[in-house]
Image: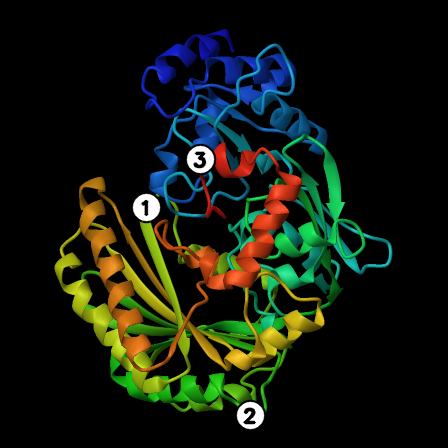
Amino acid sequence: MLLGLSLISTVAAELSQNILAPESCCSQLFAVLGSKVSFPNEVVYNRSLASFWSQQEQELNPGCIVKPDTTSDVSIAIRSLTGQEGEFSQACQFAIKGGGHTMWAGAANIAGGVTIDLAAMNNVSVNAARTITSVAAGGVWLDVYSYLDALGLAVAGGRDSNVGVAGLALGGGLSYFAPRLGFVCDNVVNYEVVLASGEVVNANTSSHPDLFFALKGGSNNFGVVTRFDLKTFTQGNIWGGSIGYEISTKDQQLEAFSRFTDANNVDIYATLIHGYAWIEGQNRWLISNNYVYTKPEPYPEIFEGFMSIEPYIYNGMRITTTTVLAIEVDGSNPSGDRQVYVTATVANNGALLSQVFDIANTLLEPLKDKPGLRYAMAYQAIPTCVMSRSLANGGNALGLSPEDGNLVLIFLDISWKKSTDDKIMNEQAALFLKQVETLAASLGMLHKWKYLNYAAQWQDPIAGYGHENREKLRAVSRQYDPEQVFQKQVPGGYKLF
């Protein structure tokens, strides 16, 4: 540990002038939290950095990393970092890491400041009535599903086993249960939160209801959430997996997808991710559809329009568990690469979606020779029943309404190996978004909402919640964080001001 302390000054020398030097910040944290604070080149520090999903986040080197294992530890850390505890009055720049799956540099890590890594806080428990699952904020969805599957229970949660509970839920959150339960955030009944003052509060419908609303999509702007209490329900096996098709079936696929999204008789047990992936080395596209039916019933009628499409390349459909499907999804999203996401939301229109694919295909051309390229695009249905469930659960901050009609979420995901390719990858992603939004707007089909968990660093998803909701979030921020700690001292995430 003494070696770690001696390295603080070396790290400080590399900081830019607008970042406070970490010596006093890390020294004070070590004084109050001891071995829960680690420093560059120590094993715990290196493991924490390696646990970030993207290479961009892994490359950032904080002055120190604190790994609390209780809510009290988090409170002590916040009080120390805001100059409320100890001999130093200096405020410190810091980041907050839950699962560490957001891809852009600085989202949940920080160069030269302090990173609070919540990974040690990953316990899961269910109340005696089996109606509420409590999940500590450092958990990932594998922790949750592997615990609940054994009990015959489930919650509305993420689809990738390695995605963090905290980031997904605070950004709204999509799940296989969205058509019948709404967004993940709609199923949170209580948040335990450490405020900027270090005070620990519970936010729910009867205690701090304004904060409760704000956390349903408001991300990391109000405090450090240390526990999520989630509605829990009985759930057995589900039918799910993916089927791969030749790109020659694209027009049939889009026709079937549009019908699925606009189905008059929505099947609330069915979800679909309609995906396109460029196959490096084969110089061709593959269509891969992820189908899930949250009952153990194979090939339900709602997917009939897809099941008649041929030829298909593979069929991985089977009756299985939520855990197994989540692990499968994670296997298709390996960590350690460089990443950029970009997202837009449009009306459900097959002709528009066909043109969006054409844009993606054209912009792919200059990237084909880049090492380790993975280039994928997906369409996800956001039918009005999802928004209706949100309203029935008390509403959220996302700014969506059944009056918006059936929507389609567009998601472009590019990954690569070399930092020298960062510029062109980000340029092509930005150009994709510009062309898609220009096209959709010209047709009167662009929606303002942008899914926060799929947004690029330079997008502004909170603006997409609408003026009224953004002002509500700002008011909550002023009330619970009057010194604006989470706006000024936590540069990561999407800010309110």
Q: Please provide percent x and percent y for residue 454.
A: 42, 58
Q: Nearer the viewer, mark 1 or mark 3?
A: 3
Reply above or below: 63 against 298: above
Q: Secondary structure at mark 3?
A: loop
| In the image, residue 146 above or below residue 120 | below
Residue type at tag 3? Asn
* Label 1, residues with CA under 10 Å away: few <14, some 14-19, many ≥20: many
Query: Disc 3 or 2, which lies upstream in sequence?
Result: 3
Give the mark, 2 or 1, whose residue is nearer the N terminus.
Answer: 2
Which colour style is shown? rainbow
Query: Could you give the CA–CA distance between mark 1 and mark 3, rounded to whole angstroms?
Result: 16 Å
Q: Is residue 306 left or right of residue 82?
A: left
Q: Amino acid at mark 2?
A: Asn
Q: Which mark is residue 237?
A: none
The residue type indicated by label 1 comes to Asp
Q: In the rendering, which numbered label is found on residue 337?
A: 1
Identify the image quadrant of residue 319: bottom right
Q: Residue at x 23, y 55 (%)?
A: 373
Q: Tell me which residue sits at (34%, 41%) in the image.
A: 55
Gap between marks 3 and 2 measured at Cα: 45 Å
Task: Label 1: state its secondary structure.
Answer: loop
- Indicate whether 49 appears above or below 168: above
User: Closer to the camera: disc 2 or disc 1?
Assistant: 2
Residue located beneath label 3 in the image: 109
For label 3, the crowd category at 10 Å Cα-Cα, with few meaning under 14, some 14 to 19 and many 20 or more, is many
Residue at 20% over, 47% down: 423
Q: Give the mark nearer the N terminus: 1 vs 3.
A: 3
Q: Is residue 239 left or right of residue 50?
A: right
Q: Return the residue at label 2.
A: 264
